[in-house]
């Protein structure tokens, strides 16, 4: 279907890595940590224990294989969605086709596309990232995140830190594009699952505000840790 594309001006930024941390650098040289870097650095112990126990259960080699496969799969699906939203007719790689067939019907309800894989900086809170999409879903303006999984999540609780990632991008989009009249207060998280319809989680403004308060705390914790490590 043809999309109503009203793209906002894109922010030029490059991704750089420093050990296990990722940063984004704009054309002025400002370097800010990524959303995922902040989440990883401030991950609650319960979440660390869950991941540790999973790696122990399946073994380090298998865990690395699973993670690598999931990462490549996610990259392929993101590129396929990007081409689709840009109106490009491009065949989906065969190994990603089950995930594409899961999520494609949801994309038919997307319209008024404002950003696709867009870099965003939140200068007041000092973080940055790349948002998957800003668009309307069934007429509701949303910040959108696309995910893949081998089986249904089943509940918001099993999304773990994805909603925090979503609210971080929502805050950065609203802050960076406020002069363009952008004010998004809904979040959309879609999980593609092979041989099943994608799971759709639409977060209302009140829920996004709750997640935002948690995110603010995580950012503060991150910078407190950075300050404690600094020799100056």
Image (tube, rainbow, N blue to C red):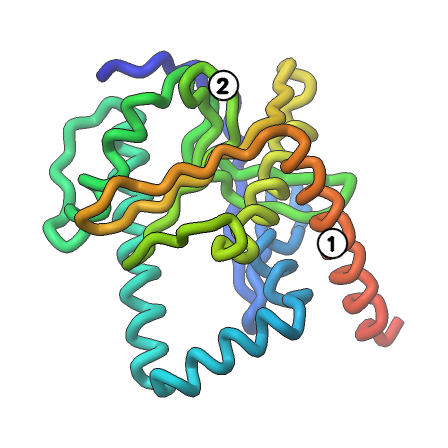
Residue 115 has which mark?
none
Which residue lies under the disc numbered 1?
219
Q: Of callouts 2 and 1, which one flags the residue occurring earlier in the amino acid sequence?
A: 2
Residue 10 drawn at (x, y percent): 51, 28
Q: Of all residues shown, which one is farthest toward the front? A: 154
Q: Quadrant of the C terminus?
A: bottom right
Label 2 environment density (alpha carbons within 10 Å; few <14, some 14–19, many ≥20): some
Q: Nearer the viewer, mark 2 or mark 1?
A: 2
Q: Is residue 91 above or below residue 44?
A: above
Residue 68 drawn at (x, y percent): 32, 68
Q: Is residue 8 above or below residue 72?
A: above
Label 1 environment density (alpha carbons within 10 Å; few <14, some 14–19, many ≥20): many
Say which residue appears at 41% left-offset and 31% top-offset: 116
Residue 41 drawn at (x, y percent): 65, 67
CA gap, disc 2 to disc 1?
Answer: 28 Å
Say which residue appears at 32% left-offset and 85% top-offset: 61
The answer to whether 174 appears left or right of 63 in the picture is right
Q: Is residue 172 above or below residue 76?
A: above
- Local secondary structure at mark 1: helix
Camera-nearest residue between 208 and 62: 208
Asked whether residue 8 is in view, the answer is: yes
Say which residue appears at 23% left-offset and 47% top-offset: 99
- Local secondary structure at mark 2: strand
Count of marks placed on residues: 2
Camera-nearest residue between 59 and 122: 59
Label 1 near label 2: C-beta < 8 Å?
A: no
Camera-nearest residue between 100 and 82: 100
The answer to whether 149 appears left or right of 217 in the picture is left
Q: Is residue 161 above or below residue 12?
A: below
Asked whether residue 27 is in view, the answer is: no
Which residue lies under the disc numbered 2?
140
């Amino acid at each position: 279907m043809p999309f109503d594309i009203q793209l906002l001006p894109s922010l030029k930024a490059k991704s750089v890595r420093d050990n296990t941390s990722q940063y984004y650098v704009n054309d002025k040289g400002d370097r800010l940590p990524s959303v995922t870097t902040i989440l990883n650095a401030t991950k609650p112990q319960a979440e660390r224990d869950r991941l540790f126990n999973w790696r122990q259960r399946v073994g380090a080699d298998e865990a690395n294989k699973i993670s690598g496969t999931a990462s490549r799969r996610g990259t392929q699906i993101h590129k396929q969605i990007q081409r689709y939203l840009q109106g490009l007719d491009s065949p989906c790689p065969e190994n990603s086709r089950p995930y594409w067939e899961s999520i494609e019907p949801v994309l038919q309800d997307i319209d008024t596309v404002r950003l696709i894989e867009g870099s965003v900086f939140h200068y007041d809170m000092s973080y940055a990232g790349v948002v998957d999409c800003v668009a309307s879903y069934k007429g509701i303006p949303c910040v959108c995140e696309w995910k893949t999984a081998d089986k249904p999540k089943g509940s918001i609780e099993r999304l773990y830190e994805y909603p925090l990632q979503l609210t971080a991008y929502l805050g950065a989009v609203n802050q960076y594009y406020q002069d363009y009249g952008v004010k998004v207060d809904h979040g959309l998280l879609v999980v593609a699952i092979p041989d099943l319809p994608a799971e759709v989680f639409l977060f209302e403004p009140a829920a996004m505000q709750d997640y935002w308060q948690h995110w603010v705390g995580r950012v503060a914790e991150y910078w407190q840790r950075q300050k404690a490590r600094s020799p100056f």
